[in-house]
Amino acid sequence: MRRFNIFLLLFVLFATVARAEWVSGDRAIMGTAVRVELWHEDPRKGAEMVEEVMNEMHRIDALMSTYKEDSEISAVNRDAARSPVSVSDELAKLVVRSLEMSRLTGGAFDVTYASAGYLYDFRARQRPQAGQIEEALEAIDFRLVEVDADHSTIAFRRNGVRIDLGGIAKGYAVERGAAILRGNGIEHGIVTAGGDSRIVGDRRGKPWVVGVRHPRDKQRVITRMPLRDEAISTSGDYERFFEEDGVRYHHIIEPATGRSASAVYSVTIIGPDATMTDGLSTSVFVLGVEAGLSLLEKLPEYEGVIVDNSGAMHYTSGLTAPQ
């Protein structure tokens, strides 16, 4: 009987391992490609967890998208210059984090960039005139945004101010997705939204290897990052753009000018929190190589790779350039 019980136990263990597999799903959410991949002993339950993460991404998109008229962020942009707008505690907290990022980066990260950014239409290849930008610049200043955290309201100090969380929301979303996986006991997984990824654990004894694409050749990978339980975010001028008379107009707007930042081609940041890596990749893109590296060296948990506008690569001191 004892031998039979041991045999039965081994059979059950073998059957469980035999069923375990990688489960994944892909969607278009938040204006980008979202992918969830995880290892689970029960593929059916794994698929349910993938769907749970996708539902969370949809929820965040419905809350924070400036393209949805019924989103909280759209209500803020419509009414916050007239009177404080009541929002969810979640949105209020993320706007507070955005304002903290603005102070950390000396204004290189600024959600009010949208005061000029909304004038661009990259699909239609439309850009604002110089006079429109100059007028909009008066409304680009993160200090014009007031958040009452106790009452979860947001107000603007002047007319014309608009905010957009596009430089931080996808990082926040993948961080939330990873939290769902961990809460369900997942030890190996990854949640990706466009250039932002949050890794849970490792790839079953191996690191997850995330490639960084060449900013001018999507078929080439310029470096590969072996990562475990970390976040990685890349911001580049190749995501949403058009060219006119030799000038590239893209979605990463420099708050000081209201125009597309042009000092670098792409920035990749790695660190423990995807909300931060997302915000920092945008910030360093605006700051450029020297100021960007200087900022990152003050943040010991975060490292970065910058591709400047000549194609040269620059690394923070905690990373080793490939030989």
Image: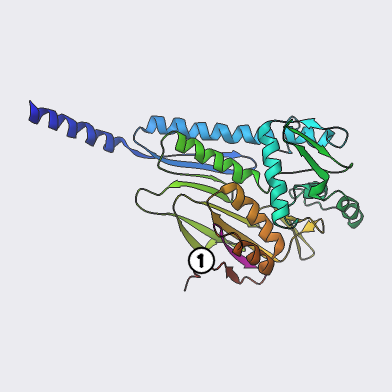
Q: Residue 200 at what x, y percent from top left?
A: 45, 45
Residue 26 counted in the magenta span: no
Tell me which colouring the rendered structure shows.
Answer: rainbow
Residue 251 shows in this picture: no
Identity, as a three-letter code, of the amino acid under mark 1:
Leu
Quadrant of the rendered image containing residue 246: bottom right
Residue drawn at x 62%, y 44% is: 170
Residue drawn at x 69%, y 36% is: 91
Where 65 falls versus 252 (above or below)?
above
Q: Residue 319 at what x, y percent from top left?
A: 51, 66
Residue lying at the far bottom of the rendered structure: 323
Where 36 falls versus 315 (above or below)?
above
Q: Which residue is mark 1?
A: 319
Observer-nearest residue: 185 or 223?
Answer: 185
Q: Which residues are magenta?
A: 301-309
Quadrant of the rendered image containing residue 188: top left
- Quadrant for the N terminus, please: top left
SS for callout 1: loop
Number of residues whose C-alpha sits closer than 10 Å to that of mark 1, classed few (under 14), some (14–19) or many (20 or more): few
Observer-nearest residue: 201 or 17?
Answer: 201
Residue drawn at x 13%, y 32% is: 6
Residue 236 shows in this picture: yes
Q: Residue 288 at what x, y percent from top left?
A: 69, 65
